[in-house]
Image (tube, rainbow, N blue to C red):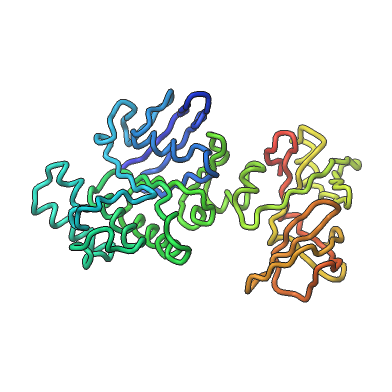
Amino acid sequence: MASVRLVNLYKRFDKVVAVDGVSLDIADGSFVVLLGPSGCGKTTTLRCIAGLEVPDSGEVWIGDSVVNDLPPKDRDVAMVFQNYALYPHMKIYDNIAFPLRMRKIPKDEIDRRVKETAELLGIKHLLDRKPRQLSGGEQQRVALGRAIVRQPRVYLMDEPLSNLDAKLRLFMRAELKRLQKELKTTTVYVTHDQAEAMAMADKIAVMNKGKVMQYDEPSNIYNKPSNVFVATFVGSPPMNMIKASVVREGALVQLDAGSFRYTLPADYSEIVAAKLRSSEVYLGVRPEDLRISAERQPNSVFMSEVYVLEHQGANMVVDLRIDSEIIKAVSQPMPLSIGDRVWVGFETGKIHIFDAKTEELVV
């Protein structure tokens, strides 16, 4: 096992900067997810760690060594790809054994490790079959087995569950998490699925346009997003962003959103007055933190019109129209109809305020 450290990593393809000054410390034995939309640089970052891409500048450390000049085969990492990359003409036993044979491991040691790995993954009964005879989930396990059997210092996984159906993906992500904790091998995992990242990671690096926007534990990524991008990318439905102007009333600060005004308590007002660099802000509230009621409540802030209702079993998603904007609330099922007027409120402790100019979190 080994830690992984990226120091000011840059990678450019022609005029496109794919990785833009990425620095990360990945602790030995941890499960770290690189999360972001397509084209954000997460796969290129992973390939730089693997040695499949050569960074233009910066350092890749594995353990106590800089590995920039080492070829992939000498980095002692194992990579699991999105398409599994199994050899179709080989039996499953031979697919798993292949990396060990390439390293000239003794035959009896190969046999022991292949069977132990197959037992661990629950695919021992499949060793005599070929990939075309396996389901997608079974092929996924074989690809994992080929990585695990090498006993590398680091696992690198590039969207390995994206080809599976929804039910199997949920099962396999739990299995992957269990395996990683059992094997205690450092794992760097790429995905664009924020639910997958939140469920599996010890820490998440949220990336956009080649940069790391926030690197933190999942709970902090969700509850304390450092900027507007993280706040709106993580969460389903995403965090509501309401544009507002700052109005100072003596020592207090009011947020004027046009259709309503909201007075911040003294402690919030002090922070906003001290840290804000512009007169415009985004008031961020997660859908589950909005409170809908037919009658005005102590925490009610404004009235809104029900625009769309989405019933989802235990919960319902309510689209609310404020002037020309739509915000979303998640609520327990309640008797509502499109066109109803409702009161909407929230607790101060559940709101986030972002500077509209920098898009960075203020409080």
Q: How far across and how far down the image is residue 209, in percent?
A: 56, 35
Figure check: 357 above or below 176: above
- The residue at the far right in this view is 249
Residue located 75% across and 56% down the image: 327
Of residues 163 and 193, the one nearer the viewer is 163
Q: How far across and how far down the image is residue 162, in percent?
A: 44, 54
Residue located 46% across and 52% down the image: 201
- The residue at the far bottom in this view is 335
Q: How far across and how far down the image is residue 300, in percent?
A: 84, 62
Residue located 49% across and 58% down the image: 199
The quarter of the displayed image where residue 277 is located: top right
The quarter of the displayed image where residue 286 is located: bottom right
Would residue 91 be found to the left or right of residue 274 on screen?
A: left
The quarter of the displayed image where residue 308 is located: bottom right
The quadrant the N terminus occupies is: top left
Q: How far across and how far down the image is residue 171, in percent?
A: 42, 65
Figure check: 57 above or below 78: above
Of residues 253 and 167, the one nearer the viewer is 167
Q: Is residue 78 visible?
A: yes
Q: Is residue 297 visible?
A: no
